[in-house]
Amino acid sequence: MDTLETRELRYFLAVAEELHFGRAAERLGIAQPPLSRAIQQLERRIGTRLVDRGPGGVTLTGPGTVLRREAELALAAVEAAMRRTRRAADPTHTITLATKAGASYELLRLLLDEHARTPGAVPLEVELCEVGEQAGLLRTGAADVALMHRPVDDLAGFETQDLLTEGQVAIVPASHPLASLDRVTMAEVADVPDLPMARWPQRDGTYLEGPGPEVHTQSQLAQRVALGLTLLVIPASSRAWQWPQHAAIPVTDAPPITTVLAWPSHLRSPALDAPRATAGALLLSDSPDPESPPARTVSET
């Protein structure tokens, strides 16, 4: 069976993302005819049509949609291989831990403190990222481990270690009538006429339809809540980034969120033993009442 080349995958991915041969060719820095011929050759080698061509651009076929996803993963794996190999050759290399800015602050602090006390552990650096970026950082090798959240984050292809399961809170403008309530339900915050709920990205990066704004960055979101433009539901521990203009209200029936330490399942590096052991030393119990902070105990190792 023929083997696909990374060049072919990059060409196809550019077409799949731009949905236009001209724009894809410009992005790749090549002429359009060679790109069109390369995609036709790729289709012949695979034995199926990948794109439907039209006067206004192209659309992906079913097989083309599959190849787009597989190409993203394959190219990320190639990039990760290069980064991790270079890092292994660096005698001063560190371990990079990715985490969403503003999330899991207390847990992150405990993890870093405990890791720092581990004799001989490789230094741990923190990469603060935006919503949903941890998976990409792991897959491309830009990060070695990450703090992620089940069931909302994309954990496909990762091994995980559970750290904390907790309830969720609604973050609303402090001046809004909802701020005076002791607790709310999902139904009560899902349909507030003057305060639409912010929409988080799904695992594939898309957003469900709705009146609320799409969540892209924490700072954007915090500003919108403070201005009375939206509300959101987040894990209770994430309210560490809460502004004075915000109020946090426990949501009694929101699904629990589990914070996990995640790393690529194929990655076998002795340098990762220390952070995984550190995570195992943090015994964080569930908090049945989302209004109260979860109990935290650090065991001695």
Image (cartoon, rainbow, N blue to C red):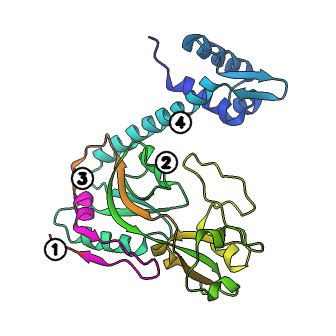
> Can you give x and y, in whole percent of width and height, for residue 243 in the image?
59, 82
Q: Of callouts 2 and 4, which one flags the residue occurring earlier in the amino acid sequence? A: 4
Range covered by the magenta-colored residues: 274-297
Position of 230 with respect to 249 (left or right) is right
246 left or right, relative to 93 = right
Q: Amino acid at mark 2?
A: Gly
**Residue at 60% from the left image edge and 23% from the top image edge:** 63
- The residue pinned by badge 4 equals 72
Quadrant (top left, top right, bottom left, bottom right) of the C terminus: bottom left
- Give the residue type at disc 4: Glu
Is 179 contained in the magenta span?
no
- At label 1, counting other C-alpha atoms closer than 10 Å, the crowd grade (few under 14, some 14-19, many 20 or more) is few
Distance of label 2 from label 4 (alpha carbons): 10 Å
The residue mark sitting in front, 3 or 4, is 4
Residue 257 percent location from the top left of the image? 45, 63
* Separation of marks 3 and 2 at Cα, in angstroms: 21 Å
